Image (cartoon, rainbow, N blue to C red):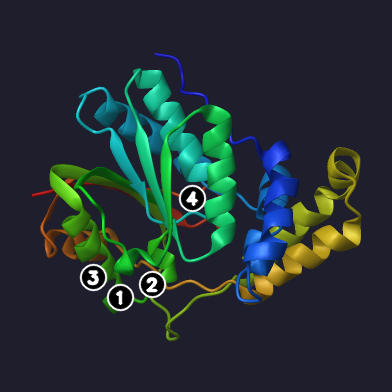
Amino acid sequence: MSAIVVDERLDEGAPIQMRLSRTHCTDNCAWYHGPRQYLRALGVTIGIGRDSEFLVNALAAAARLGNFQRVLIPASADCGTLAHVTAAYRDAGAPLHVTFTDRCGTPIAVNTWYAGLTGVPIDTHHVDILDFTATAPLDVVCVHAFFGWFAPAARRHVVRKWHALLRPGGIVVTATAMRPRETTPTVRFTGNEQRSFLIRASRAHNEARDRFGLDPDTVDRWAEDVMRLKAHYPTPSEHDVRVLFESEGFRLQQLFTVDGRSAEDPKRIRVVAERV
């Protein structure tokens, strides 16, 4: 079986997302949303990265069953999740209708753009997922690296909301980084991660100039902003994820961890959970 090809249209989307961020973002998220697709295209920020194959294969397997066409993406920093959903359903030859929610208008607008390019029906809602109400039960929730934005107690509300939005037998497909608990509630880039991040930014200088007309100082400033401002709540173990889903009425179809590619690359926890 050939690999499913995902085309995120990063080169086209990068300037569009930057432009949209100037209209829709606040200071709280412009540093993150604005340059994200540039940094993704240049390999500075990894994005879905090595969770890509897991996501598209899990989604395609569900799509081939024929009754998983209503997909909710409860947030996304760019078009990456939608691109994976689109590629999986196209490979399966299955019908698809996407519902997309986000608290910021930039992801909404850029995902609307991507859906228009690819002909995918999409409904968008400018709302926090916890405040969203669907008009009919959904079949799939797909989101990447979402838990890191929520403290552990708040994650229970998120998973409970997903349970309420899904039909019985509906599934959640997601992946997140695994990091040990720290003495502080959130984690930032470690020293090694900072060095690796800045090295990737430095190596991208020539490509950024030739491919996008970006000067090195701009790329470095974007990278430094991400390092300085991005903080996540850690997901410590598979056990934490199992308890989180099972306590909120899900059955784990898949739950496993894969090693990082290096000492600076965290392990990944991958999940397919069925609403009971």
Give the residue number, with chain letter if any, for mark 3: 156
Vertical relation: 231 (above or below) 173: below
Distance from Cα at disc 2 to Cα at disc 1: 6 Å
Q: Residues within 10 Å of mark 4 (few under 14, many from 20)?
A: some
> Are the residues tagged 3 and 1 within 8 Å (C-beta)?
yes
> Are the residues tagged 1 and 4 within 8 Å (C-beta)?
no
Q: Nearer the viewer, residue 103 or 184?
A: 103
User: Which one is earlier in the sequence, the residue at label 4 or at label 3?
Assistant: 3
> Are the residues tagged 2 and 1 within 8 Å (C-beta)?
yes
- Under circle 2, the secondary element is loop
Residue 150, which numbered label?
2
Q: How many marks?
A: 4
Give the residue number, with chain letter if any, for mark 1: 154
Distance from Cα at disc 1 to Cα at disc 4: 27 Å
Distance from Cα at disc 4 to Cα at disc 2: 22 Å
User: Which one is earlier in the sequence, the residue at label 2 or at label 3?
Assistant: 2
